[in-house]
Image (cartoon, rainbow, N blue to C red):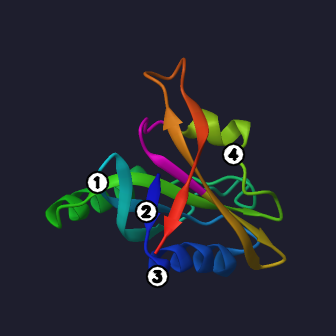
Amino acid sequence: MLIISRVNYEAIRRHGEETYPNECCGVLLGEMENGCRKVTSVERCVNTRTDSPQNRYDIDPKQLVRIQRQGRERGEDVVGFYHSHPDHPARWSSTDLAEAHWIGCSYVITSVENGKAVLTNAFELTGSNEDDKRLVDEAIEVG
C-alpha cells in the first residue's frame, strides 16, 4: 500500500495538468512503515525526453542522485516515482514496465484528459530481477 498526504497527492496531479500535453515525472520520497510505503515529500523532475515527451519520460540521472542525496539528509528514501499519461488511461504500458528498475518501489500514474487530472493509480514493481519484474496494482491511501 502507498500512503500519501492529500497535499502531495494533489501536487502530483497538478504537475500533470501543468505539463499537459507532455508527460510530467517526479520522485516519491518517504519511508517504509508497517509494510507500506509512506510518502513524506514529492520532488518534481524535468522530463528530459525530447523525442516524444507527450508519451514518454526520462529523469536525468544527475537530478535523481541529487534528490536521493537530499532526501537521505532529511531521513527519507526513494519509495517510488510518478508520471502522467496525457489523454491515456492511468495504467502502465509495456514501456513503463521496461523502463522501471526500482524493485520494491511504487509507480504512480495520473491520467490527464484535456489538461485535467482524472484518475491516479499506483503500481508496485515486484520481482527479484529484470527478468521476472512486474507491475501489480497497489492501493493508495490519501489522507
Look at the image and give the residue range highlighted in magenta.
Answer: 101-108
Residue behind mark 4: 92
Residue 108 in percent (x, y) is at 57, 56
**Which label sits in the foreground, 4 or 3?**
3
Q: Check if mark 2's residue and mark 1's residue have beta carbons within 8 Å.
A: yes
Mark identifier at residue 7: 3
Q: Say which element carries label 3.
A: helix
Left or right, 35 with respect to 133, comes to left
Q: CA distance from mark 1 to mark 4?
A: 25 Å
115 above or below 53? below
Instruction: Say which of 64 and 79 sits in front.
Output: 79
One can see residue 105 in this view:
yes
Q: CA distance from mark 3 to mark 2?
A: 12 Å
Q: Residues within 10 Å of mark 4 (few under 14, many from 20)?
A: some
Q: Check if mark 4's residue and mark 3's residue have beta carbons within 8 Å.
A: no
Q: CA distance from mark 2 to mark 4?
A: 20 Å
Q: Say which element carries label 2.
A: strand
**Which label sits in the foreground, 2 or 4?**
2
Q: Say which element carries label 4.
A: loop
**Which label sits in the foreground, 1 or 3?**
1
Q: Check if mark 1's residue and mark 3's residue have beta carbons within 8 Å.
A: no
Mark identifier at residue 33: 1
Residue behind mark 2: 3
